[in-house]
Image: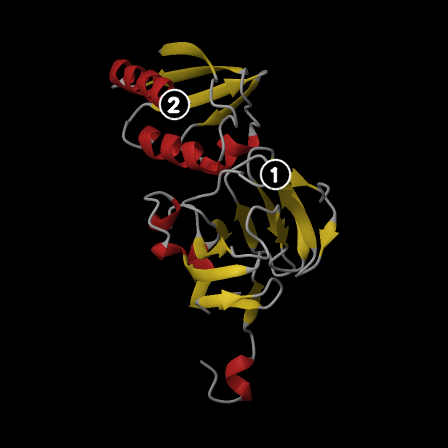
Amino acid sequence: MRSFKYTITDEVGIHARPAGLLAKKAKEFDSAITVEKDGKSVNATKLMMLMGLGVKCGDTVTVTAEGTDEEAAAAAMEQFFKENL
Amino acid sequence: MFKNFDDMLGVRILAAAADGRVMPIGELGDGVYSRRAEGDGYAVVPSSGIFSAGRDIALYSPADGVVSEILPQGGITLRTGDGITLSVIYGGGGRISAELGARIYAGEPFCMLPRGSPLINGAIAVLINETDRITELHIRSGRRRHGSAAAFYRVSE
């Protein structure tokens, strides 16, 4: 299992467009990828659940990847967050 | 679409969620929602012009239903009487006045987007989540007033 923490810098947080791109990116990997905020964890491939987390600017989330390609998945997800959120 | 009255039986209507130009969601061109992975339906580009340019955008419910989910960063989901879940998704930053569990009606305002709010490729998406139940979907593309019919659909029981 691989995980990292990230503090959101996008002023609107995880809103519709990055949530959609995030879900799309997460689907590229076989590993189960989750995003957790304040004890609530959701499947990163589920766009509505991501938006339901209510992640705002300044919030810190924990992203976890678990599976056969977890190293690549975690690295790619961290890169995605840095570029988009 | 309707040749006679019998054709209209079982047809459900989605109202336009905002004043603007309606198009099938597949034409949105954002690469995410337009792929219909989150549902099928329509997008509406809020109208602009000398009367609305630079103003806040009001969003209206596309159907009668119960607010089943409020997505703090950009939308709500509604549960209709026939068990269909509708999602109204915009970019983010809106002021949602609807309450979780409340019943709202087609054409009823539920959200105000401040000017400059991010949208999805300039549009708001209205999606039917249960795509496997949709047996027919017709989008009334073009300029529509909020509350007027934007789409007709049938679902399997």
Residue at x-position 69% and y-position 53%: B109
Residue that mark 1 sits on: B94
Residue A33 circle label? 2
Residue B23's place in the image compared with B76, above or below, is below
What is the three-letter code of the residue carrying label 2? Ile
Residue B157 rendering spot, x and y as whole percentages: 53, 65
Task: Give the CA distance from mark 2 to mark 1.
Answer: 28 Å
Asked if labels 1 and 2 touch by Cβ distance under 8 angstroms, the answer is no
- Left or right position of B102 against A66: right
Give the residue displayed 58% in from the left and 63% down from the top: B15
Q: Nearer the viewer, residue A15 or B85?
A: A15
Q: Which secondary structure, mark 1? A: loop
Residue B27, position in %: x, y? 35, 56
Residue at (61, 38) in percent of width and height: B94
Q: What's the chain of the residue with tag 1?
A: B
Instruction: For residue B156, say whether it is visible.
Output: no
Report the residue at 65% width, 45% height from top. B111
Figure quadrant of residue A24: top left
In-front residue for pair B92/B88: B92
Numbered disc 2: what chain? Answer: A
Q: Is residue B82 visible?
A: yes
Q: Nearer the viewer, residue B3 or B46?
A: B46
Q: Position of residue B2 (x, y in %)?
A: 48, 83
